[in-house]
Amino acid sequence: MKNICVFASGTGSNFDSIVNESKQGVLQANVVLLVSDRPTSAVVSKANHNQIDTFVFNPKDYSSKAEFEIAILKELYERNVELIVLAGYMRLIGDTLLKAYPKRILNIHPSLLPHYKGKDAVGQAMKDHATITGVTIHFVDEGMDTGDIIMQEELSIVSLNTRKEIEEKIHAIEHRIYPQVINKVLEELS
Ligand code: GRF
């Protein structure tokens, strides 16, 4: 069984689903660490509740991205983390982590990339009167939502009228496909 780490800064619904799938043995991995740059975020409470170790930091306490990524790396190495899974971590990953974990960092994004990169992808799709959006899981590179795509799933939003309805459907897709993709990537590592 391989060890994985989740990076998240928000509500943590994906974190929850990953942890639950791991507990049920559907996800063939141990979630050994949560990394978060937002001490007050709900995801940190969720990790504490599940007795999962956390590394919670304030970027302002470090002089550079390299410096806080070195601190993260130490935590990852101490726990033999083999794969990093981003789930609502709102920062670009820097060289330090990218070099230490090549093709071993995944991200999930609530659009069909390359459409609607960056913040508030659902809002961007709504503003654009899109009829279809979806979810993308991709490897992380130095860009914003630009790495090689591993899996995408479409969602028709023609009959969905509110942001809440769209977000619920997006989350349902995310919670279903992220553990599947993590399993697949982990299998390919071994
Ligand atoms: C998800 O929609 C994910 O696609 C994006 O951030 C959101 C995190 O949601 N990267 P949650 O905190 O897992 O509920």
Image (cartoon, rainbow, N blue to C red):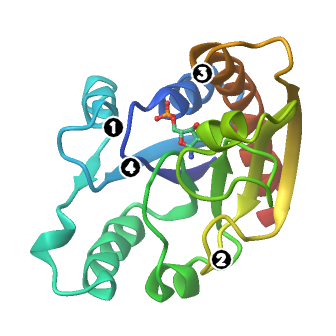
- Ligand 1, image quadrant it occupies: top right
In-front residue for pair 151/33: 151
- Residue 117 lies, in percent from the top left, at 66, 58
Residue under the image location 36 percent in, 46 percent down: 9
Q: Amino acid at mark 2?
A: Asp
User: Of label 4 and label 3, which has the lower sequence position?
Assistant: 4
Inter-mark Cα distance, 1 to 4: 6 Å
Q: Ligand 1: does it lie within 8 Å of the C-beta at label 3?
A: no
| Residue 190 can be seen, yes or no | no
Q: Dot 3: what SS?
A: helix
Q: Are marks 1 and 3 in contact (CB under 8 Å)?
A: no
Residue highlighted by disc 2: 141
Inter-mark Cα distance, 2 to 4: 21 Å
Viewer-nearest of discs 3 and 2: 3
Q: Ligand 1: does it lie within 8 Å of the C-beta at label 4?
A: no
Inter-mark Cα distance, 4 to 3: 31 Å
Inter-mark Cα distance, 3 to 2: 29 Å
* Residue 52 circle label: 1
Q: Dot 2: what SS?
A: loop
User: Of label 3 and label 2, which has the lower sequence position?
Assistant: 2
Residue highlighted by disc 4: 33
Q: Amino acid at mark 3?
A: Arg
- Residue 48 lies, in percent from the top left, at 25, 31
* Residue 163 circle label: 3
Residue under the image location 47 percent in, 64 percent down: 80
User: Of label 1 and label 4, which has the lower sequence position?
Assistant: 4
